Amino acid sequence: MTVMTEQTSQKQAPHGSGPVNWARGNLFNTWYNGLLTVVVGAVAVAAATGLIRALLGFDYTIIRVNLALFMVGQFPRDQLWRPSLATVIIALMAGIVAGSLAASNRDTARQAGLAYVRPNLAQVLRRFGPAWVLLIVLLAFTTTIGPTLVAVGALLGLVVGRALGGR
Amino acid sequence: MSTSQAARGSKPPFWRDLRVIRIVIQVLAIVVVAVLTYVLWFNLTNNMKRAGLSTSFDFLTQPLGVDIAGSDVGPGSPVWKGLLVGIKNTLALVVVGVPLLTILGVVVGVCRLSTNWLVAKLAAIYVEVLRNLPPLLIMFFAFNAIFLRLPRLEDSWNPLGLMVINNRFIAVVGFTAQPGFGPFWLIVGISLLFGAWVWIWRTKRSERTGQTSHRLRWSALLVLACVVVAFLALGQPIGLSFPVLDGRALLGGYQGFAAYFAVLLALVLYTASHVAEIVRGSIQAVPKGQTEAAESLALTSYQRLRFVVFPQAMRIAIPPTISQYLNFTKNTSLAIAIGFAEVTRITFQTIGNGQPAPQLVAMLMASYLLFSLTISLVVNIINRRLRYMTT
């Protein structure tokens, strides 16, 4: 998602590529931009440190104790394998859909003569970044192995489905 | 089909004649609305009569039964006084909040498009976080995590003796009326009119002669000079009253309750994030040719923004911003969850004390309607002058 600015493009690095030159071009290109970067950066760093320190310092016992209630309500605990199985099956189907979409994209590209680049693992992981954070945070609050198994099963379902659908 | 019949010279049957159908549908619509209204009204009044509830507005002079903090309305005051205090509190929120949220929204919206990567990203984070949280949650957070964490009344902060800050209220220096207060404001009003006349004169002169009008500095300096002279000549008709804590009471100064500031902070932040997106969208909606033409005229980035892009962008931004103002006004009813005595809370408290609910809720709806329609009307006057007309 590119951010459009008044100028037609972000300034290209005047002296070459690399993080220092990127900073020169985007953070310190004018004197007021440099000042703004320093001031706003200091405020942002202070706020972020305070926020992280506070978040880590809270007492999360109540979430850990009640996590099952938050996640599945008052579903009878001995029947939980049913929604877990349903999650894995849905993940499988979602993977198949994703795989077939990717396959049709690939075929269209081939027909049009364009190059089709398969996204590598890092790109896929990065795209779903917030979902990974949510998953890891939720799993960190669990006390049994069950939810982790369900999560692993759902991920496997996604991967297998993608492979199946992509053929 | 009707064309061949028209060619034959005869009219279509009345159930296919467009003129008849139009009239019949309109009459039917009126009849349906009238019948529905009558049924609902009859249902309401019938049920109220059967339950023994009165349908009159006599309850307005009954005693309120509760205390409203921060005003001189007590359990013995009539209901209408309590409702008036509620309306005053809601107006205090709206009148202070709308300018604040406009400024903040425009600033954040422009920052979102900055060339400084850090500023742009931080503005994006602000907008994304605050747009996607429910305003009630932001209000809870502002009240419980920010304003209730201020020190207790006994240990109030007292910076420079000018403010008193604690977790119940925030008090600032106030103004008192000394002798000569009335004449002073009269003179201020007259000098403002004078300043407006000077503004118009300088503008006309500039149009006639082509010289820069300098109208702002002429009229501002004139008004300032008149005000200062009047102030000194009348012997300082405005005095300062410093907020002083006397035990548990506050003497002097203006105070606002913590709940008021919490509601203000939460709703200004929330609505400003929406306005920021509107501003960003409207700046990007200005045709790129304008920016390129301004660049080719060697205008600086600031001049481009202020003289070319912004005027056109604000025209586009006004109608959606009106809805955001109305959203702000209606969201103030969420303050009931924090206990701020605005009109919704007082209405429901009065209902809880046994006053008839249908009339009270109808009055509540009427007051919100009044606020919203007024804001809409005022901003639409501005909109009508500035909107994009295709020749």
Image (cartoon, coloured by chain):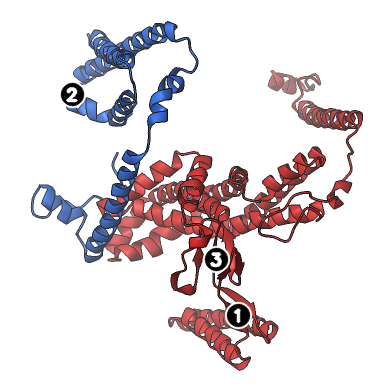
Instruction: Tell me the chain of label 3.
Output: B
Q: Which chain does the red colour mark?
A: B
Say which mark, if any, is on residue B171: 3
Query: Please, what is the three-letter code of the amino acid marked with disc 2?
Result: Leu
Whether residue B291 is visible: yes
Image coordinates of residue A141 in percent, x first then y, are: 34, 25
Q: Seen in the image, is B129 located left or right of residue B66?
A: left
Q: Secondary structure at mark 3?
A: strand
Q: Residue at x 86, y 52 (%)?
A: B61
Q: Secondary structure at mark 1?
A: helix
Please name which of the two marks, 2 or 1, marks the residue nearer to the observer: 2
Residue underneath mark 1: B192
Q: Residue at x 37, y 61 (%)?
A: B305
Image coordinates of residue B145 in percent, x first then y, are: 46, 47
Instruction: Tell me the chain of label 1.
Output: B
Residue underneath mark 2: A121
Image coordinates of residue A61 in percent, x first then y, are: 38, 30
